[in-house]
Structure formats: C-alpha cells, structure tokens
Image (cartoon, rainbow, N blue to C red):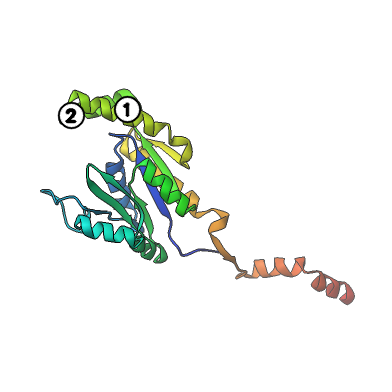
Amino acid sequence: MLKNKKRGSLIIISGTTCAGKGTVIKELLKRNDNLCVSTSYTSRAIRPGDIEDVTYHFVTKEKFEEKIKNNEFLEYACVHDNYYGTPKKEIEEKLKEGKDVILEIEVQGAKIVKEKLPETILIFVMAPSMNEVKRRIIARGAETKEQIIRRFQTAYQEINEIPKYNYVVVNDEVENAVQKIEAILISEKCRVDRIEEISVENKEEVLHELLMDKKFNNEIKEIK
C-alpha cells in the first residue's frame, strides 16, 4: 500500500502575452477543489473592479519595503514604480494543508522561486502561433502600435526561457489546455519521491512478504 506525502505541490504557470493563462487557471480552479491561487502583494493603487485580498493584497510602498526587509517574499519585482511580491508564509501554510498552490508569475520570478524551492512544477503556456498572439492583441483593441511591438519583443524573450520549464502547454483551446495541465498534475502526484511510505495491508501482500523471507522458507523446508 502506497502512502503519498500530504504536502501539496507548488505550481508556477507562466506564458507569453495573450496566451490565455488567466482563463486556463480560472477553469482549473472550477474543476479542482484542491487547487488554489496565491494572492500576491502590491504597492499599486486599487483600481475599479479590484477586490481587496482577492485581486491583490494592497499595501503601501513603505509597508511592502518593510516586508522585503523581513524576508517575507518568495520573489518580488518593481514594475513601473510599483512593487509586486509572492508571499512566503501564506503559500507555506497552504502547502502544509495539502493544497496545491498555483502562482501566475513571469519567467524571472519563476526562476527565483525554482532556485529556492526546487520541487516547484514549472508550466509554460503559449498561444498556438505568434500570428494568433497578434490576432488576440488586436482583438483587445487597447494597444498602440508601439505597445504591440513591445509585447512581441517580450514574448520572444519569454519563449527563449521555455527550456528552463518542466512542461509546455499550447493553449489552442481552453479545454485541451486544461486537460493537459490536469494530466501533468496527476502524473506529478505519482512521482516516486512523492511516496511517504509503503505498507502491507492485505493478505496477498502479507503472503508475498512471507514467501520472500528466507527464514520463513527455511522453516517450511524443515517441516517437509
């Protein structure tokens, strides 16, 4: 009988712009009760539609820097003068509870977390093609030509980081992408290093152990 470790898995999902990471993660959460998403901290201002402690944990810049000094983040970055960070304590608590925790972070943050926690599962999600990325960006209708070019440059840089990931999933259709990630998570649970102990609990296994025992075999020979 196999007994797996209770500790949950830490899963990082990264990907290129317009890869549909957010949509895939939302669907994963709907279908898997043991999955949860880590809520990051940020020093940026709350925007319309944001929900405190759901979208982000919103704190002041001074409070964020205090947390940096106290080593409270697995990783953090400053983007456009605003801090964003992944909380260490909250993630550790959820993992100990046996929850599988998803982090949606960019490639540099993923690299830092992997160095600190080597058992982290890295999944890279990408669109079927760069033409599809272009189509999705234009469909948004909110990008200038310069912004689109910048997004493309970043996307190519991120694609070059794929070899550092454990898995890559092409999001051609959300359902297909979700099923692939679910398969990845199932296979990860079957890894040998996830086994905590092996115990013998039924008659067939007990008999097998006895037959493999030299002393028991010798006793049988003496009876004959």
Instruction: Identify the residue at horizontal 39%, vertical 66% (top origin).
Output: 97
Instruction: Identify the residue at horizontal 33%, vertical 49% (top origin).
Output: 28
Instruction: Identify the residue at horizontal 36%, vertical 28% (top origin).
Output: 156
Disc 2 or 1, which lies upstream in sequence? 2
Asked if disc 2 and disc 1 are in contact, CB closer than 8 Å, the reply is: no
User: Is the residue marked by circle 2 packed among few (<14), some (14-19), or many (20+) residues within 10 Å?
Assistant: few
The spot of residue 9 in percent (x, y) is: 43, 56
The spot of residue 176 in percent (x, y) is: 36, 38
Q: Secondary structure at mark 2?
A: loop
Task: Indicate the amino acid at tag 1.
Answer: Gln
Q: Quadrant of the C terminus?
A: bottom right
The spot of residue 82 in percent (x, y) is: 22, 47
Q: Secondary structure at mark 1?
A: helix
Q: Quadrant of the N terminus?
A: bottom right
Q: How many marks?
A: 2
How far apart, in angstroms, are the residues tagged by discs 2 and 1? Answer: 14 Å
Going by the image, does 6 lie left or right of 39?
right
The spot of residue 112 in percent (x, y) is: 42, 48
User: Is the residue marked by circle 1 packed among few (<14), some (14-19), or many (20+) residues within 10 Å?
Assistant: few
In this figure, which residue is indicated by the disc labeled 2?
Answer: 143
Q: Quadrant of residue 24?
A: top left
Q: Nearer the viewer, residue 96 or 214?
A: 96
In this figure, which residue is indicated by the disc labeled 1?
Answer: 153
